[in-house]
Image (tube, helix red, strand yellow):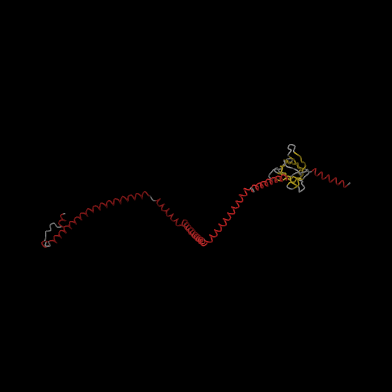
Amino acid sequence: MIGLLLLLLTLAFVTARRLLEKRDHYYVAYTDISVSGLEVGSPVKYLGINVGSISEIYIDPLSVNTVIVKLSLRSGTPVKVDAVADIVSIGITGLKTIEIRGGSQEADFLRADQFIQPGTSLAEEITGKAEVIAYKVEEVLNNLQAFSHPDNMANFTEAVQRISLLVDNTRLTFQNINLLVAENRPDIREIVSSTRHISHMLDSTSFELFSAIEKFNEIMQGDTLLQVLGNFMDISNTLKETNLDELIEALANTTIQTQELLVRLGDDIDKGGETLNENLMLLQHSLNNLNELSRKVNTNPSLLIRGQSTRGTPDKMLHNQ
């Protein structure tokens, strides 16, 4: 009797605990998805943790293709509005359960007695993947059938032959290139040496050009250019400070005075020329008289002894004039 009483008390305690435990109820509606394997009392998990069980499964009276599953979860289970309820298998027994997944930290909590978004079913995934695999297999078989067509095989054979011919031609070309390189190896070495020499000359030229640029920069940044610019600036300032009007007027007066001096000098030269012409005429006349006298004396030397009259001598003629 004592043992029976203890057993009844234990059962009552467990039952009362389960009955008195506060639960939140949610609903999941699966449309066109098989729920085979789900049973009332099957566990409900949240990210792998057991948070409740399935309390009821029934068909939606408004839609014969929709199955509604009622979930009984422990109070305070953090179900978000963007969470989904997937149907997953339990081991290899064929039994299934619902696992709540997803839900972002920023989303709001889903209130009790509301619908959780339905997820996928393992059977549905397998069926979908099987359909995709079957479609791909069928496509591969069609491609193999099209490839194995006699016309395509003939084209493939022709392409293989062309590729073989191309390989042979390529091999022959490489052999000719090797032979050409072997025959002209000294010339090639000479060309490489010339190229190296030209490169060395270009390096030297580049170095000299770089040096010239450095010198130009030194000149541009040195004191010489600054002195030239300073002198030019001083000249500009001097010209700016000079009264150009007075300078031009002085140059004009000097030009006028020089012109007057040249005019007077020209007049004096003209006057001196007239006097010089008169003197030259007298000198010519005197020379003529002397010439005449010399001719007469040469003809008759006795004239020097007789004392010829001096009329008409050059001195008298000069005095008369």
In this orientation, which residue lies closer to the viewer: 193 or 49?
193
In this orientation, which residue lies closer to the viewer: 30 or 72?
30
In this orientation, which residue lies closer to the viewer: 150 or 39?
150
Q: Is residue 201 above or below residue 144?
A: below
- For the image, the number of numbered tags is 0
In this rendering, position of residue 139 left or right of residue 54 = left
User: In the current view of this chain or complex, which residue is farthest to the top?
Assistant: 62
Q: Is residue 186 above or below residue 240?
A: below
In this orientation, which residue lies closer to the viewer: 321 or 192?
192
In the rendered image, residue 114, in percent from the top left (x then y), is placed at: 73, 40
In the rendered image, residue 82, in percent from the top left (x then y), is placed at: 70, 43
In this rendering, position of residue 285 left or right of residue 99 = left
When asked about the image quadrant of residue 57, the answer is top right
When asked about the image quadrant of residue 132, the answer is top right
In this rendering, position of residue 50 left or right of residue 151 = right
The C terminus is located in which quarter? bottom left
In the rendered image, residue 203, in percent from the top left (x then y), is placed at: 50, 59
In the rendered image, residue 8, in percent from the top left (x then y), is placed at: 85, 45
Q: Is residue 302 above or below residue 113?
A: below
When asked about the image quadrant of residue 175, the answer is bottom right
User: In the current view of this chain or complex, which residue is farthest to the right?
Assistant: 1
